[in-house]
Amino acid sequence: MTKELLIELFGYLGSFLVLISFLMTSVFKLRVINTIGSVIFMTYALIIKSYPTAVMNFCLVLINLRFLWKMRRGSKEYEFIKVNGDDKYMHHLLDKYYSDIKVCFPGINIDLENANRFYIIGHEGKPVGITLGHKEDSEMEILLDYSIPEYRDFSIGQFLISKLPNEGIYTLTYNGPDENHTAYLNSLGFQKTEKGYEMKL
């Protein structure tokens, strides 16, 4: 394989990542993948001395980094909505996102009969998260903590945790599937236990 071919493949990789980023449903993932692709394509453009292309991709990197910084540092205005177990709108949301919930939580059993706490998280009037839990005294076991794809940047979890002490909840546990959620649980401050995860609020 020649050096010229390797350089060209490097450029194709950057283009591919930029294009694939627009298929992401999560804005955060879109920005991250787009940034990586733009860095690669900018490097390729510098190698072949296509400076206008390099400048354009450099600007894209700066724009993405700015938005990523705002997403991490900024705070969204969420709404905390407490509902009951027979709330029709909550059941509608669970039905609507059932397929995605099963993908996010492989093997999960959404047991509404065991839940006695039901919360919907909204953003600008749109439902973006659903949390089901079983509260006993000051401890709540999380049975489901679901966010729609566009809002999986950990901010909903942080918002929810800030509201739970007002509900008389000071210990959170989670014993469900974690294969897709280890980074999320660790980022919020959960500690691994024999049964699952636990966090003191």
Image (tube, rainbow, N blue to C red):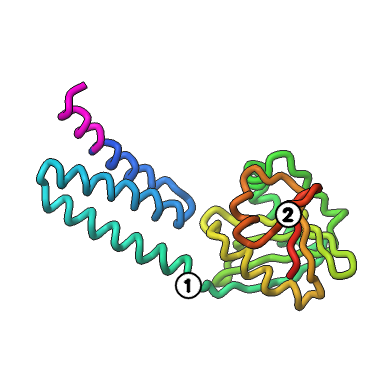
Which kind of residue does numbered mark 2 sit on? Leu
- Which residue is pictured at 63% across the width and 63% down the height? 157
Main secondary structure of the magenta stretch: helix
| SS state under label 1 | loop
Residue 149 forms part of the magenta stretch: no
Q: Which of 83 and 170 is in front in this view?
A: 170
Q: Quadrant of residue 131?
A: bottom right
Residue 36 located left or right of residue 193: left
Q: Position of residue 110 (x, y in %)?
A: 78, 48
Whether 48 is drawn above or below 189: the answer is above
Q: Nearer the viewer, mark 2 or mark 1?
A: 1
Q: What stretch is highlighted in magenta?
A: 1-10
- Check the picture and name the quadrant holding the N terminus: top left
- Which residue is pictured at 63% across the width and 42% down the height? 103
Whether 159 is drawn above or below 176: the answer is below
The reply to whether callout 2 and callout 1 are in contact (CB within 8 Å) is: no
Q: In which quarter of the image is residue 20?
A: top left
Which kind of residue does numbered mark 1 sit on? Gly
Q: Position of residue 128 (x, y in %)?
A: 60, 62
Residue 117 located left or right of residue 122: right
- Check the picture and name the quadrant holding the C terminus: bottom right
Residue on which the image places disc 2: 144
Residue 8 forms part of the magenta stretch: yes
Residue on which the image places disc 1: 74
Q: Where is residue 137 in the image (x, y as percent from the top left)?
A: 89, 69
Among the two numbered marks 2 and 1 on one chain, the one whose residue lies closer to the N terminus: 1
